[in-house]
Amino acid sequence: MLRPKLYVACLVGPPMTKRVWQHQGSALAWRPDIDGLRAVAVLAVIIFHAKVGIMPGGFVGVDIFFVISGYLIASIILKEEAEKKFNLARFYERRIRRIFPALFLVIAASAAAGAVLLAPADYVLFGRSIIAAMAFFSNFHFSHQAGYFAPAAETQPLLHTWSLGVEEQFYLVAPFALLLFARQLRPWRTPIFVALFAASLAVSMWGVATQARWAFYLPHSRAFELMGGVALAMGLVPVVQHRRINEVLGTAGLALIIFAVLFYSERTPFPGFAALVPVVGTMLLIHSSMNSGSTATARLLSQRPVVYVGKVSYSLYLWHWPLLAFAEYEFGASLEVWHRVGLLIVAFGLSALTYRFVEQPARNAGPPVTRKVVFAGGLAAILLCLGARELIVDGKGLPGRLAPEVAALARATPTRVVSGGLCSFGEEGVRARTAADCAIGAPTATPSFMLWGDSHKATIAPLVAQLATAAELSGFNIGRGGCVPLFGLEGQGRQFRNCLAGPSEVERLLHDPDISDVVLIGRWGLYAEGTPSPNERPTSLPRFVENDQDANRETFGRLLVETVEKIRASGKRVIIVGPVPELDVNLPAAFVKAAMKGRTGDIVNARADFDRRQLGVLPVLAELERMEGVSVFYPHLVLCDAEVCRGSEHQMALYVDDDHLSPAGARRLEPMLLSILNLIKG
């Protein structure tokens, strides 16, 4: 499934309620076992984020929290409605008191840390997320950002607030929906509720298979998780009175959660059907202790240390991720496990202080902290974050906070692909219907070549267009980021399902007698290896064969050869641009960060790393080069020598991330591109 880098780095949702309650007669009784369940959830998540390797599925803590929140909020609303005491203003006042103070503190602390640690381009990204986090739409914000060119998730300090957005959006809907179920829809509440639950689950399953990014972030594909808790609060699942049955249910629930935590991984398609395991497990644990008895699992979860962790879990959730994200940003691969564990200990200390001196006073404060004051304070916090966002983003990351020479370097270092030359087929946004929508070069010349490639083509296409115009040549620019320029993708799995429009258009143009040459440009090492570069997450990668690298290389090589043979059979020449070296760092960030620390000198990678990465590519290209009508050009012969491959040169960044060339990097290939155009021109 397609999963942005971002995805798994922040799979957690915080607890959102002050106390844990049970809908039981006329009272809401505190249930320490649910506080303990919150502790299990947050511990699983933070251990997962610390990358200690013992809980590969710890991200399912988000599902546990969602179920708990659905149960608690629905219990409170339905109980107050039954007693004719529900007040919408009081409901949202409690939410503001609970959520805003600690969240605002963490955002402010993160902004201060970012001003010291983040390079200007990264501070701009952070600035854009500030208002999204405080106004609870960060799930939408990050769903748009986490695309093909998105920065690494681990270094975005507020990425974890996406789950706050999901829960807050639930709070906007829950009171009205629950009151409707309790009043007008009461006779039909069960079939309507079941239909809505099934619809959300179906949407989530479909989204995981087709649009994993929005399925992960957006509320309609997560609603069924919260509804699992709501179902218990509404009494749609009858309470079991038999003690032994409850013991079995509680044990089964805990077993399901443990199974998901230990056996799920970042490659598990999620949420979708897989989310039912932790959701049902959490429901069983809550449900098994809803009568007057207490199960063994409930007693285990009610131990005082476990309950305390549950009580501070909201602050622990808020603090742990920014600490890990800033450390990952600052130290990268040198951040060892014991460093991460130390950061979690710091997060525990900060969460205990925040719970004691921020959360509890904010919840319990009486006059003069009236409801009007609470709402005014919440609005003020949002406006302050909006102002900070404008200051940081409009100020281009505030380079003035840096030394003058570092600020100048930051301003001159590009951080995104100049993708004007990438005309996408089958992609939302720029949607080309035919190659005529993607013509490049001299407008009066008859198109004589095709550029067919992925985002690596996008980095050089603007320069090709400029050089082709000067040479009075024109051509068509076809492709899409992340899509290997090959025929035969139809049977290669769903990860290539959005990559079929480009090959179809190329095949049509092979019948055009004016087209003489097809230029193939791609990130060949990625497709051949099916594994990430050192700076990438091991997900969202186009693989031909899962869990078999040799077979993946073989399939890639076969498809490349078949593609070349098909083009040659149409009478066209084939020009292949070989692989661009990949780096083990995000070049602009590393470049500017080094300057911020007073380190000068260019950033390089070992040439041996490039050679290893291209083991499945270079032999195939050498074989193809011997075919008549096939020419191969090698960018690495320009960007590398016998020892190193250069990421920067004379204090100029040659990349905009870890593998896409900057305009300066593309310009280094100008002699090679001129040779290609001269070959086309004949």
Image (cartoon, grey):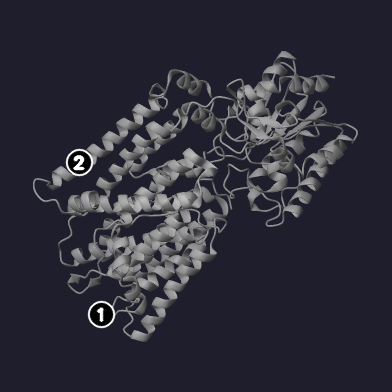
Crowdedness of circle 2 by 10 Å Cα count: few (<14), some, many (20+)? some
Please indicate, yes or no, whether residue 256 appears anywhere in the rendered image: yes
Of residues 592 and 210, the one nearer the viewer is 592
Q: Tell me where residue 530 appears, x and y as whole percent.
A: 68, 48
Of residues 616 and 609, the one nearer the viewer is 609
Please indicate, yes or no, whether residue 570 appears anywhere in the rendered image: no
Q: Is residue 603 above or below residue 306?
A: above
Numbered disc 1: secondary structure: loop
**Residue matched to label 1:** 292
Furthest residue in direction left, as rendered: 367
Residue ID at (35%, 70%)? 190
Measure the alpha-carbon separation of dots 1 and 2. 40 Å
Looking at the rendered structure, the number of numbered marks drawn on it comes to: 2
Crowdedness of circle 1 by 10 Å Cα count: few (<14), some, many (20+)? few
Instruction: Report the amino acid beneath label 2.
Output: Gly
Numbered disc 2: secondary structure: helix
Q: Tell me where residue 470 appears, x and y as whole percent.
A: 71, 13
Residue ID at (49%, 26%)? 598
